[in-house]
Amino acid sequence: MDAGDVVLVYPHTAFAFGLYSPFDVDIDTSKEWQGLPFTVTFPSPEVTVLPYSRDDPDNYRPTVEAAAHGHDRVWLISSHRSKDYGALLEIIGKSGLSVQDKVKSPGAELLLFGRGDVSSSP
């Protein structure tokens, strides 16, 4: 990541991202996650966990637009994707960003979106 980059975390990826990322993680007991009495949050302003919106992916739009505003590079990390993933990619594209780089592994994907020609450095 470069200075000024932001990371969008697909909702079902938040726990794994919390375990393996260099960012600080908080346990939030005021919110439930799929039957668990807590969820994970990231105090860093560079990291945003997308809201759970599998049934209505348009709910991603405000979060994506807020994250993309003023940033030329936005990373999306995902695993455990569902039918809403394609709509999420469309929403990111409509915010003026396009895929600049992609890293895939079984069950997970890291995408770098940017404006114009941006270089990647994960």
Image (cartoon, helix red, strand yellow):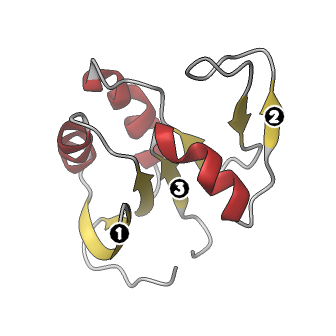
Residue displayed at 23% across by 52% down: 96
Mark 1: amino acid? Pro
Which quadrant of the figure has residue 115?
bottom left
Pointer 3 local density, CA inside 10 Å: few below 14, some 14–19, many at least 20: many
Pointer 1 local density, CA inside 10 Å: few below 14, some 14–19, many at least 20: few
Q: Is residue 11 left or right of residue 47?
A: left
Q: Mark 2 = which residue?
A: 27
Q: Is residue 115 left or right of residue 65?
A: left
Residue 14 placed where, x, y %? 58, 45
Spatial CA distance of label 1 from label 3 is 20 Å
Q: Secondary structure at mark 1?
A: loop
Which quadrant of the figure has residue 113?
bottom left
Q: Mark 1 = which residue?
A: 106
Residue displayed at 27% across by 74% down: 100
Residue 60 placed where, x, y %? 36, 30
Q: Nearer the viewer, residue 35 or 92?
A: 35
Q: Mark 2 vs mark 3: which is more N-terminal?
A: 3
Q: Is residue 80 left or right of residue 46?
A: left
Q: Nearer the viewer, mark 2 or mark 1?
A: 1
Q: Mark 3 = which residue?
A: 7
Spatial CA distance of label 2 from label 1 is 27 Å
Mark 3: amino acid? Val
- Marks 2/3 in contact by CB < 8 Å: the verdict is no
Residue 31 placed where, x, y %? 70, 17
Q: Nearer the viewer, residue 64 or 88?
A: 88
Q: Nearer the viewer, residue 108 or 76?
A: 108
